[in-house]
Image (cartoon, grey):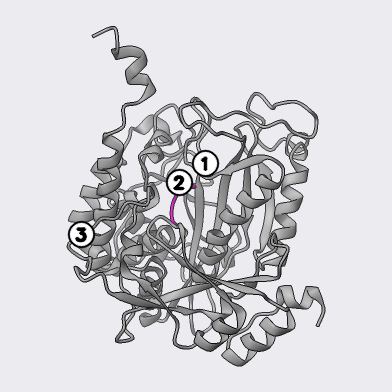
Amino acid sequence: MTAEDLATEVTSTPEEATRWLRAARIDEVECIVPDMNGIMRGKIIPREDFIRLMEDGLRLPEFLFFQAVTGDTADESIVVNPLDRDIRAIPDLTTMRLVPWYEEPTAQVICDCVFMDGSPVDFAPRQVLRRVLDLYAEKGLKPIVAPELEFYLTGRNDDPDMPLSVPTGLSGRKESGHQAYGIEHANDYDHVVNLIYDYCEMSRIEIATMAHEAGPAQLEMNFRHGDPIELADQTFLFKRTARLAARRHDMVATFMAMPHQDMPGSATHIHQSIVRRSDGTNILVDETGADAPELLHLIGGLQNYVPAAMSLFCPNVNSYRRIRLESDAPINVHWGRDNRTCGLRVPDSPPAARRVENRVIGADSNPYLAMAATLACGLLGLEEKRDPEPMVEVDAHTLGVSLPWHIHQALSELQECEPLRKVLGPRFVDAYVDVKNLEWQLYNKVISSWEREYLLLNV
């Protein structure tokens, strides 16, 4: 078996995984669980130990799903088990991949979590997405998604009180201005981008296209369309991949929604369509290729529920610096055809590819939860046969803000939205809100440089 075969082979059974691990001479396996923030948690296990436990899974403490981005734990959550019991992380063997940047052969595998009685951990982000997909399956439907992920390359930053810097490119200069789609400006970071592509190819992350975005050293990677679980897995793994590739060239890849003051923010745009499981045809068009009523119901659901789901799309305090009047990011949920000023866009496309693009989502979102939430909003629109507001043909930024302004408001709206609680799972919503409220409390304790600059001697 060649190195290329090992990199691209997909395993699905313990026997196939065992053969692959030994053929690849894997030394260790990283068993990964995405937490509420999309941070990788888990354990690193020697190969033969992994082979022995892959069917039963490995034990992890339940509290890992209640960890904030700071590492603090929401111990007082109404969902957390007071006994801090273990759960089992069961490797999804179809996600087994090489880790391309280690000298010693290493594999990574994403795990699903179950309680000790074998029932799924209902507040695990990957399970939340699967729950939404199961609701579609009950109706004979299957969503198809295609994420577009923006991020910045920056210079190394060892002092969090200092602004981030623009990295030096191959030209020997630091980029300035707004060079959206600039080919030569993208070429300035070819050494990093090429390494990202190499890493992605070795770990089965399928990148379709790359473009330079409007900010200095801001790039966008577009993923091929496909199954939401697979695309969420790839997006989840890609963030680490990009960070490690940038580090090799003494840079930082950041997925903060707003890393630079007065520069464009970074988004995750998710294109979503829905096909019939029976024959794969797109329900958003009729037999003539014209828009079907389901397209409008999907948009109506997104318009009605995206504001309540905002904390899942924009999960951090920093996220809301991107959602502002002077930004290119959407500030409302108006919809339009090929209108990028709208929060919801229907791109020009052939009937089979008719879809809706959710442009509200930030690059800092957990891909499992962002996909679960946008699909949940659409599902509710289909179930309720909800009609959207009229399409707009003007700059939607002139029509006012209709999205929450900050995380605290967004969390309240999610907590109070019973339809979303039902689709996503009430215990998940409660757990998520508790973790994010903890982060809000920790943030509020910090005195910012702006406060010291303008209040210290002036008030």
Q: Secondary structure at mark 3?
A: loop
Label 1 with label 2: CB-CB less than 8 Å:
yes
Whole-number angstrom distance, CA of label 2 to CA of label 3? 26 Å
Which residue was labeled with disc 3?
A: 77
Q: Position of residue 22 (x, y in %)?
A: 70, 84
> Is the residue marked by circle 3 packed among few (<14), some (14-19), or many (20+) residues within 10 Å?
some
Q: Position of residue 114 (x, y in %)?
A: 36, 79
Which residue was labeled with disc 1?
A: 266
Q: Is residue 346 above or below residue 48?
A: above
Whether residue 336 appears in this view of the structure is no
Picture disc at residue 362 = 2
Magenta segment? 359-366
Residue occupying image coordinates x 34% and y 60%: 377
Sooner in the amino-acid sequence: mark 2 or mark 3: 3
Whole-number angstrom distance, CA of label 1 to CA of label 2? 6 Å
Q: Is residue 361 above or below residue 379?
A: above
